[in-house]
Image (tube, helix red, strand yellow):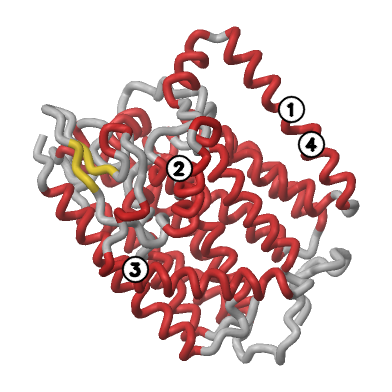
Amino acid sequence: MAWIAQEHPVALITESAPTSLSAAHKLSLAAAFASGAVIWFLLLSGWLGVTPGSVITQRQNVLFSSDSSIWISAMTGETKSIFLYPHPLQNFLWRPPARALFHLLSVFLPANYAALLAARLLSAVVAGIGIGFLGYLALQNDIPITQCVLLFSMYLLFTCNATMSLPEHFAISNGLLTIAFVVPVLTASPRIRTRVLSALVVLCGGTTITNALFPLASLAHFSIKSLRVRIALALAAIPAALGVTLLLYKKSFSLHYFIGSFLNWRLIHDPLKAGVYTFFAFVGPVIGPIPRVLRFPGWDMVSYEPGHLPLQLTYHPWVLVLGVAAWLALFLTCVLQGLREERTRPYAWLLLGWILFNATFHNIWGDEFILYSPHWSWALMGLVVLGARRLSRAFVAAMIVPITISQIWTLLAIKSALQTITR
């Protein structure tokens, strides 16, 4: 069953016997994954307290330094967002649909309920569509339905989905980046692939400016056959991007303040700690440790880095160790399988590169590491999807059980910590 462009030398062509599922059945299942994800994100955000009048909707920096209250107001209220440096097209891309949902829901609900539900629904829908695309990729890769259900149940329980369920740009970025990965893999038309990726450069970069790099890298991957040329372009792009950033940093006071306020230089000042954070990049989004609560009058917050103290590996208690070990076993098995097969190797390297880029970037800039993880958590699941086709049902089930127990434990701990914050 050839389901990728034939002109690509390492196209993902299924080697096993064709699945009994029809194309329509796969699309229906993928739509079910997407719909289930939307419902889950809405339920999760409500469970975490994203309700009218709650503290998480009244001020920023309640859960992992998130700015949900500001985002809700900017997308559904009368005043537009002023955070245009990291999110240059946010007002243009996401305010109109959020406002439209708000006006529609206002017919049935009070204004404060309608505004909050509109923001939550928009984020959940975009993230859910991304999960639907990834589910379709898994089905096209002939991962059996049982394994798909187990793996995507695990995906919905990722710790970083506590952030993703909040009405903010992280869920939207996650959905767009997932689509930017899946569509080029599935499409058979170079023209469609180029057009979709070009549009996603604008959508991803307009939502969060650094995320334009993934569809750009994907464009180069699919358009340029020579590995030497790709490497040369990457080596040229890095100093060019740094040069432009430095120029803007020096010329713009606002940009200077924004960048300077969140520089941590951990990679330079403390490489050992940067290594801990890099390990956390592969584990934390899936099974986060038990969070801490920073106590500061009027600014209490749930955090893994309270008071900007560095993240510690010991934050994972012994009760979560088995789940972490099971995740690493599942993840590394899938990564090795993805790298071993010629048909999946280039895509696996692309995803690993994106994860390592984010780990490096946020070891230089950024405050709460887990906050940004929706930008690469989809790539962790993408690597699982690429390598899970040959995994037995027994192995997947044996890994999923301790993983999901640990994930539920962590989500309950986050909920418990949030309940201690009342203002």
Q: Residue at x 61, y 81 (%)?
A: 389
Q: Give the class, few, some or many, for how many residues have Cα within 10 Å of label 2's Cα (few <14, many ≥20).
A: some
Q: Nearer the viewer, mark 3 or mark 2?
A: 2
- The secondary structure type at the circle numbered 2 is helix
Q: Is residue 18 above or below residue 339?
A: below
Residue 195: x and y, percent?
74, 47
Q: Give the class, few, some or many, for how many residues have Cα within 10 Å of label 4's Cα (few <14, many ≥20).
A: few
Task: Look at mark 4 in the image and give the residue it sits on.
Answer: 235
Q: Give the class, few, some or many, for how many residues have Cα within 10 Å of label 1's Cα (few <14, many ≥20).
A: few
Q: Which mark is residue 25?
A: none
Q: CA distance from mark 4 to mark 1?
A: 7 Å
Residue 399: x and y, percent?
43, 79
Q: CA distance from mark 1 to mark 3?
A: 40 Å
Q: Is residue 283 above or below residue 109?
A: below
- The secondary structure type at the circle numbered 4 is helix
Q: CA distance from mark 2 to mark 4?
A: 26 Å
**Dots 1 and 3: beta carbons under 8 Å?**
no
Task: Look at mark 2 in the image and give the residue it sits on.
Answer: 273
Compare residues 111 and 248 and report the one nearer the observer.
Answer: 248
Q: Nearer the viewer, mark 4 or mark 3?
A: 3
Question: Which is nearer the N-term, disc 1 or disc 3?
Answer: 1
- In-image side of 338 versus 154 (left or right): right
**Dots 4 and 1: beta carbons under 8 Å?**
yes
Q: Nearer the viewer, mark 2 or mark 4?
A: 2
**Dots 2 and 4: beta carbons under 8 Å?**
no
**Dots 4 and 3: beta carbons under 8 Å?**
no
Task: Look at mark 3 in the image and give the residue it sits on.
Answer: 321
